[in-house]
Amino acid sequence: MVGGFFPTPYPDECYYSILCRYFVRSGSAGYKPTVKKLFGNMQCLSTAIFFPMRLDCVERWIPKGTAITRKTIAMNHTMYPYLSMICSEKFRKDMAQVLNGRNSQKNFERTGTRRSYRLWPEYLRYCPRCVCEDKNLYGEPYWHRAHQLPGMVYCIKHRVRLMDSDVLARATNMTFYAASDQRLSEHDDNSIRDGYDQYKELFLRIGQESEWLLHHGMDIDWQFNFREKYMRLLREKDAATVQGVPDYDLISYHFNRYWGEEFLEILYTALNEAGDCVQELREARLRTFRPIHHILMMCFLKGSVKEFVECKVSENPFGDGPWPCQNPICMHYGTNTCQNSDLRYVNGVAIGFFHCEQCGMIYKQIRRKGKTGQLLIVEYGHIWKTELLRLLGTEKMTVKEAAKILKCSPSAIRWQKKKIGLTKKRTYVRRPPPYSPDVGPENYYKEQVLKFCKEYGEVMPTVLRRHAPGAYSYLCKHDYVWLREHMVYKKDLAEYRKQDYEILKKVQSAYEQIRKGGDTDKRITRGYIAKIAGLGKNTLVAGALKKPRTKIFIDSVIESKEDWLRRRITMIWEKQNGVPISLADIKREMSLHPNTFVEYKDFLKELMDELNDKTE
Ligand SMILES: [Zn+2]
Ligand SMILES: [Zn+2]
């Protein structure tokens, strides 16, 4: 027992803080003698902020039979419950033994210290309101455990900003800095504006989750594969394939959307690290994952650490069986009796087959993007089929009646009938031919065509098809020449012919006009003719196709680019009166696009040679 005045720990008081208060009570004799008195040898004190170091000394400090034990120190005054999730199974076992009275090994202490390194804040933190309350309640302030947690920016109880004290965390190594010896403000400072306040709720949430871990971390069996569980849940979010292969870009996208990229950046800055939680998922054993990364990931996937820990997610994308039987006439209908008989993965989709042993029914379902699709019956099973045969055979029911009893659609029954082989052959009766054998088809159909011609003047295929079925197809095959003579296509109808002639007349006179008084420099095109003839721009382009006579005429008079170039250049050559023509002459006389000279280089050269030959 250490002098009989070892202090009773305050609620959520940090282990280090308890030691500091002992130091003050024992008369502040200095670091070395106090540490020696407490531990029997020299110790680094910073570890006590986070880790239950040297628990073997607890019995020397505190009389047996009090409520304070190794376990209560570790659970209520260190961050071990928060940390235990990232400890190895062996370490957790060792810890359990130490808590139960075994002496701790050097190795164990060293690992624990190392585990806590990465949690260190720069300065010890405190909440001004807590300081005020503690002074009123206990007469002195103390260092709170929760305030030193990574990512803790606000006091969860008072929802105010935590403040940095003057005590550097690394300076606690060899010094007892009791909170009562520090100048700690009792007023929250509202002047701090550093980007945290707009994310206050998110920080509080992280804080609450961290505190939840402090209170429950040691009761949870962390002995499961974190990464595997993450991947299975990511599968539900469609950020990993049904087989659990992650798509890190998608995970990043969803994760950043959940927390907000700016918040994450500020949080990482507050934690003084450059890591990216999602990128660290790549590591198979998540060695670099800290509790805060797990908190971020668990909240993202399940809303909270508690939900995550409690949720069960099976390897099978369809969950843990058995699955319900879907056969309405099976005695197990709706009860979970089906086994997953097969599981296939096709193009990112999981297809599960479920089999009821009682009735033999097999159905399948697909699962993708965390959603299960409609079920499809693959095999109806012996009970259903026997009943079907009885209903249709012995009971002589219709398909509809049987469908009602079997609680399925009539089409399902028809399909099953076919599969079983219960089909009746239907005979198709051909329609008797409309002609008598002694007349024969050819004479009969020709007679009909002639009848229509007489009646309407001319006859089109559509009319024939409607009023003399068979005639068109028969004559097409057997005497097309005759048919063509007696039938007109739509574009040949009298009305269309009239239009064609009218336009042709206009076009011809327009062409004459161009020839006599038009701009001889201009190329004769459909558009040019249409303009002179006073016709719409497209009448002679698309419209001409339906007017065969106009088309023939137009095609014969319009100029191709070569025709036009030849005509124009010949005109220039004639004007020169015997002087050989050159490219410069053409450039001067005609304003051609530069590309034309490139495109028609050979043509122009040949043409000039031809003309110049005539000159000589
Ligand atoms: Zn507080
Ligand atoms: Zn069944």
Image (tube, grey):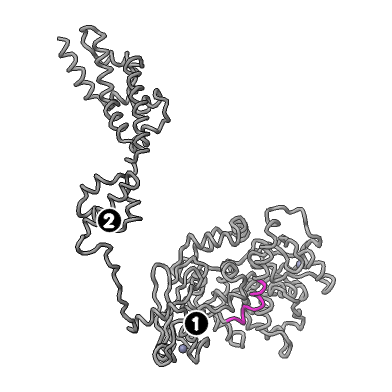
Q: Residues within 10 Å of mark 1 (few under 14, many from 20)?
A: few
**Mark 1 highlights which residue?**
320
Q: Label 2 amino acid?
A: Ala
Q: Is residue 564 visible?
A: yes
Q: Nearer the viewer, mark 1 or mark 2?
A: 2
Residue 447 or residue 307, whichever sits in front:
447
Q: Secondary structure at mark 1?
A: loop
Quarter of the figure with residue 200: bottom right
Q: Main secondary structure of the magenta part?
A: helix
Q: Is residue 117 above or below residue 377?
A: above
**Residue extending farthest right:** 136
User: Residue 269 occupies which quadrant of the picture?
Assistant: bottom right
Q: Which mark is residue 293?
A: none
Segment colored magenta? 210-220
Which of 418/595 is in front? 418
- Give the answer, above or below, for where 532 lies relative to 457: above
Residue at 24% in and 14% down: 582
The residue that label 2 is drawn on is 471
Q: Quadrant of ligand 1?
A: bottom right
Residue 262 location (% of width, % of height): 61, 55
Query: Is there any visible trace of residue 42 in the rendered image?
Result: no
